[in-house]
Image (cartoon, rainbow, N blue to C red):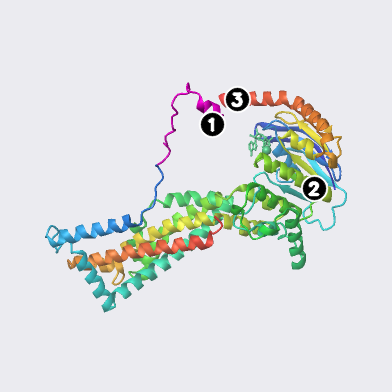
Amino acid sequence: MLRMSDKSAATPAVAARTAIAFRGGGFVPGRSAWAAAAAFAALLAAWHLASATGVLPALFMPSPGAVGIALWRLAESGALAQHVAVSLQRIALGWSLGVGAGLACGIAMGLFTLARAAGLPVAMALFPIPKIALLPLFILWLGIGEASKLATIGLGVFFPTVVGAMAAVDNVPRSLVRMGQSFGLPPWRIVFSIVLPGALPGILAGFRISAAIALILLVSAEMIGAQFGIGAFILAAGNLMQTDQLLAGVALLSVLGLAIGALLTALERTLLRWR
Amino acid sequence: MDLAVRGVRHRYGALDVLDDVSFDVASGEILAVVGPSGCGKSTLLGIVGGLLEPSSGSVTTGGAAPQGCLNPVTYVFQDFALLPWRSVAGNVALALEPHRLAPAERAERIAAVLALTGLAAFAQALPKQLSGGMRQRVGIARALVVRPAVLLLDEPLSSLDAQTRLLLTDELLAIWARERTTSVYVTHNLGEAVALADRVAVLSRRPGRIKALLDVTVPREQRGKEAARGALAALEARLWDLIRDEARLADRERADAADE
Ligand SMILES: Nc1ncnc2c1ncn2[C@@H]1O[C@H](COP(=O)(O)OP(=O)(O)OP(=O)(O)O)[C@@H](O)[C@H]1O
Ligand SMILES: [Mg+2]
């Protein structure tokens, strides 16, 4: 079209040609490795500056350096390892119990009409209760020890897992189930070869939600009645106005959250390579 | 193995979809089923394959199944219905899993159908790594690995592009020339119907019933040849004459239904 023939180019009557201007770019987020580092550096620098100039009074908001030193001392004394170990144990056990039971119930509700008809209304009714409200009751039943904390975390992740696992089973394409039936696969084989692998992405996505809930409940429960654990440590530091220690605990929680997220990402990468 | 469909009716709630459909498919015959969209072709195939229960009527098979047949009535699906987490070989193997087979026979069957469909080099590939045409080849290989007596194909090529469709049409013809499997082939592509089938059943608009049954008189092995083109085109034109008014009315009814 631009060059139909050489003759037309030679014709003087042809007007000046117009180049078509590029207008398609943008609206595609790119990458920038240094921007993230710069943002963190700027944040730390501003914090440090505010502390150094006294804008932030050291008693209420210690400098980043002071928080770092507090963390170092905690690590040296072995207290850090102790608190982290106790918290990790609680969240791992509570989460596993709640998610295990939730998966069993949710998958059953995805597969069986009766389980769903009976279970869904119950789950929906109990889902909205903030489970931390039940901790005092669990303390009455189970005592102030580990059991009441585990029950709170477990119950807190149970209901979201039930609902998520049921939805994950629902989302497995029925055409795949029909395919299995058309080849004469028995029902248990359809469940284990088609439904459960098909529901896995949804179930793993639910793990992220339940892990976040578990972390919140862990800290809350530890603040209500515990000697050890990151939540208990933060509360004790606050009571003594040791804000450097308090913020060190908060930083630990942030690291814990990131570590859990990274673990789940690795799990998805290995189990869902087919996506 | 032959197939007899007798007086099949089907309703989805208040919606009459199939009205007294009867036909036979002889052993080794390929019957194409064409009709306007929404007339109940998939419903009919679902009933034939035992995946849907008809409101009334019956489907029976007769005669002996071929040697080594594990799943007499076997589907090829429009959307391929592959398990995305399994490799090509794994998807084909699924069809053998409900059956007790010696490991050697299992491997040999899988290798044979992968070779037949040109997938041998892709045995370990995942579905996401394959083109649409390759995915449907997996669907076909999975159906053939059980040595079916009756193949049911529900628009197997309709989600493929036009060129891939032509390629697979030829491959299906080659497979049928070898296997002579009794088949019911649902399509809305009239060219495909006359290229592949021995007979073509034309369904009316919903509620679907058999409007006509036409023989494709050109022998299958001659259909690729220049000389056969005229006869096939004439047949395709005849089919379109039968369907055009039905399709137009069906389209209008859908528009009316959408207005309500
Ligand atoms: N499960 C269902 N419940 C209710 N109505 C259905 C169901 N499945 C199909 N229908 C309706 O029944 C009619 C026939 O559907 P069917 O899928 O058999 O038609 P088809 O001829 O295969 O159409 P297409 O050419 O679009 O593939 C359609 O009007 C469809 O909307
Ligand atoms: Mg259909």
Q: Mark 3 vs mark 2: same chain?
A: yes
Q: Secondary structure at mark 1?
A: loop
Q: What's the residue type where badge 3 is placed?
A: Ala
The residue to which callout 1 is attached is A3
Residue A191 appearing in the image:
yes
The number of numbered discs placed on residues in the rendered structure image is: 3
Question: Going 62% across and 27% down the picture, which residue do you hit?
Answer: B254
Q: How many neighbours does mark 2 have within 10 angstroms: few (below 14), some (14-19), or many (20 or more)? A: some
Q: Position of residue A163 (x, y in %)?
A: 48, 52
Q: How many neighbours does mark 1 have within 10 angstroms: few (below 14), some (14-19), or many (20 or more)? A: few
Q: Nearer the viewer, residue B37 or A24?
A: A24
Callouts 3 and 2 close, C-beta under 8 Å: no
Q: Position of residue A42 (x, y in %)?
A: 24, 57
The mark lying in front, picked from 2 and 1, is 1
Q: Nearer the viewer, residue B252 or A130?
A: B252
Q: Which mark is residue A38?
A: none
Q: Chain of mark 3?
A: B
Q: Secondary structure at mark 2?
A: helix
Q: Quadrant of residue A75?
A: bottom left
**CA distance for labels 2 and 1:** 46 Å
Q: Which residues are magenta?
A: A1-25
Q: What's the residue type where badge 1 is placed?
A: Arg
Q: Position of residue B220 (x, y in %)?
A: 84, 41
**CA distance for labels 3 and 2:** 41 Å
Q: What's the residue type where badge 2 is placed?
A: Ala
Q: Chain of mark 2?
A: B
Quarter of the picture containing the N terminus of chain A is top right
Q: Which mark is residue B174?
A: 2
The residue to which callout 3 is attached is B255
Quarter of the picture containing the C terminus of chain A is bottom right
